Amino acid sequence: MSKPQFSRLLGLAAGLGLMLGSAGAFAQEAATPPAVATETPGLSMGTPAQAGPLTQEQANVGETYMAKAFEIWEQRCVKTADGADPCQLYQLLKDGSGNSVAEISMFALPEGGQAVAGATVIVPLETLLTGNLTIAIDGTAPKIYPFTFCTQIGCIARIGFTAEEVGQFKKGAKAVMTIVPAAAPDQKVTLDISLKGFTAGFDAVKATAPKPAN
């Protein structure tokens, strides 16, 4: 049985979309109230609502954009209202024929835990989930990771990396991801993860990570 073609480009939703609409203006006619002696306690008198349409900056909140390229990696960020945009390091993975197969997005985690970095991997729906996925960094022994769930865009694995593994990513030339197609469970699809530009890209992403509260 021939290896199935994974040619569909998967879309990774790198951030949550924010649906913003323009609210209509309500006209209010002020009638002359009867005379009152003092303020009425316990009742809200209201505050003026924001007038006018949303600014361009407000309308862009929730959008994903590419901040910078690091070789084949992309620093993708999500626009926030306060300007502290969180980012991830993204790479589109292709097979030996140049077909877009999978995506990986890496992000920094707060210090103190076993994992110092996390990653979201998306593969085609036609992947054999029980086959898991493996990642080997520069020829080291591969690690096996399970899939977490599937959506319309593909099946997703959420994985963590230790400080030692992140160090291997920074020193290495490439990592290799392996998945198993459901239509050919006796075969494997191997995908190269280029590590060129990873060090500078991950450091840039780490700088945007939210700082832990004191």
Image (cartoon, rainbow, N blue to C red):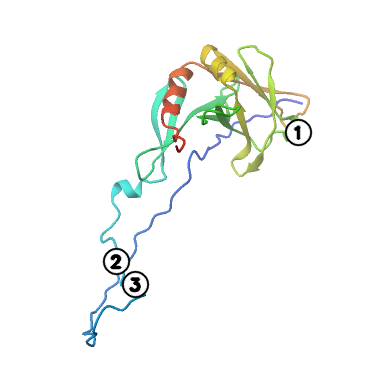
According to the image, label 2 marks what residue? 47
Quadrant of the image for the N terminus?
A: top right
Mark 2 burial class by Cα count in 10 Å: few <14, some 14-19, many 20+: few
Q: For residue 5, what is the image quadrant?
A: top right
Which of discs 3 and 1 lies nearer the camera? The answer is: 3
Helix, strand or loop at label 3? It is loop
Q: Is residue 133 left or right of residue 23?
A: right
Residue in the image at 68% along x and 22% along y: 143
Where's residue 127, x and y in %? Answer: 69, 33
Separation of marks 2 and 1 at Cα, in angstroms:
57 Å
Q: Residue at x 49, y 38 (%)?
A: 14
Total numbered badges shown on the rendered structure: 3
Mark 2 or 1: in front is 2
Residue at the disc numbered 3? 44
Q: Name the spot of residue 21 as percent of width and height, x first.
A: 37, 58
Q: Which residue is under mark 1?
A: 130
For disc 3, the neighbor class at 10 Å (few under 14, some 14 to 19, many from 20) is: few
Q: The residue under label 1 is which amino acid type?
A: Thr
128 up-or-down from 186: above or below: below
Instruction: Give how far apart the Cα atoms at labels 3 and 1 are.
Output: 59 Å
- Along the line of sight, the residue nearer the viewer: 179 or 32: 32
Q: Nearer the viewer, residue 107 or 211?
A: 211
Q: CA separation, marks 2 and 3? A: 9 Å
Which of the pair 182/166 is nearer the observer?
A: 166
Crowdedness of circle 1 by 10 Å Cα count: few (<14), some, many (20+)? few
